[in-house]
Amino acid sequence: MIIAGPCSVESESQILATARALAEIPAVSLLRGGIWKPRTRPDAFEGRGEEGLAWLLQAKKETGLPTATEVATPEHLELALKYEVDALWIGARTVVNPFSVQQLADGLRGVDVPIFVKNPVAPDLNLWIGAFERLQKAGVKQLFAIHRGFSYYKESPYRNFPMWEIPIELTQRINVPIITDVSHICGNRELLLPTAQKALDLASDGLMIECHVHPEEALTDARQQITPDVLKTMLEKLVFRSKDTGCVERDLAGLRGEIDDIDDELLQLLARRMEVSAQIGEYKKRHNVTVVQMDRWRKILSDHVSTGRELGLDEELVNAVFEAIHHASIQRQIF
Ligand code: PEP
Ligand code: MN
């Protein structure tokens, strides 16, 4: 599923021209257009509101493309349905607020329209799941998740850090298709293609990509929007992978067997390591030495990180694995 269209519906001519160009790309299945824009600072462009809905409807009638917009309040919902918007999404800033999500869920009782739930701005999986549960309880049947990345306190090349593990865990907990909003993850045009490819490689079910006929003049998110032409080229470059492993099952079997053997070895080694830890614990107790020896631990960790680096292992992985091992070792030595 490819959802494309401007960040904001700005004018009749802008949405019509964008929709006409997007309708020429067969892969595009839904025309997006923001009508009410949640802005970080006041006095920024906050969307056209109801007149924008009329233009969006006109674009749909002319091109045949179904439409989607963001709703944050029951009033938005009512107006969007009045103007025949085909699918709705709940934005990242709304999903953080269970009161707002509940109001939308209540407004959706008895309404059969696909709802896309963006991840909350904070990396809080339960909050995201909670939004789905509220909608499900209200009887909403067609639910989709949109992964748009998360606020992150460290510097990063992304506008919203992807934290791919969170949408992956979401699909393990609830059964919803995941659409990756690469535009809001990246925040710039340059990263869109590799990020979209990564999403598809990780089994994303579709992409949301902001498109504008004149991206540099866009009233919102100008740095991340692309022209429909650029979208077309991008879609041609992307490799869409199959989730069905049937055809490669035999080749994979050998490699999977190898992974199983390695995991088994890792477990044996861990058990041995814990045994030695317990012996050290006994020794420390007998000689009145504290269990936690922070200086030695810091030295071990930094040695492991640099060895890991030589072996091509990610620092984050080495840190996480040894932090967990250290934690378990201390538990062993205390009890
Ligand atoms: C948007 O899709 O234009 C938008 C405001 O997204 P988000 O809620 O992900 O910030
Ligand atoms: Mn946007």
Image (tube, rainbow, N blue to C red):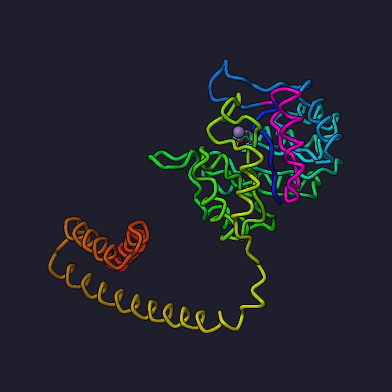
Q: Quadrant of residue 227?
A: top right
Q: Which residue occupies 71% across, 51% down?
A: 1
Q: Which residue is more in the foreground, 289 or 199?
A: 199
| Position in image of residue 64 (x %, y %) | 84, 40
| Position in image of residue 165 (x %, y %) | 51, 55
Residue that extends furthest to the left in the rendered view of this protein? 287
**How many marks can you see?**
0
Find the magenta span and give its range: 10-36
The quadrant of the rendered image in which ligand 2 is seen is top right
Left or right: residue 42 versus residue 306 is right
Residue that extends furthest to the top in the rendered view of this protein? 43
| Position in image of residue 156 (x %, y %) | 41, 42
Give yes or no for residue 17 being in the magenta stretch: yes
Give yes or no for residue 236 being in the magenta stretch: no
Q: Which residue occupies 54% across, 45% down?
A: 192
| Position in image of residue 159 (x %, y %) | 48, 38
Q: Quadrant of residue 105?
A: top right
Q: Which residue occupies 29% across, 75% down?
A: 273
Q: Which residue is more in the foreground, 329 or 222?
A: 222
The image quadrant where one finds the C terminus is bottom left
Q: Which residue is more in the foreground, 229 or 37?
A: 229
Q: Which residue occupies 46% across, 42% down?
A: 158
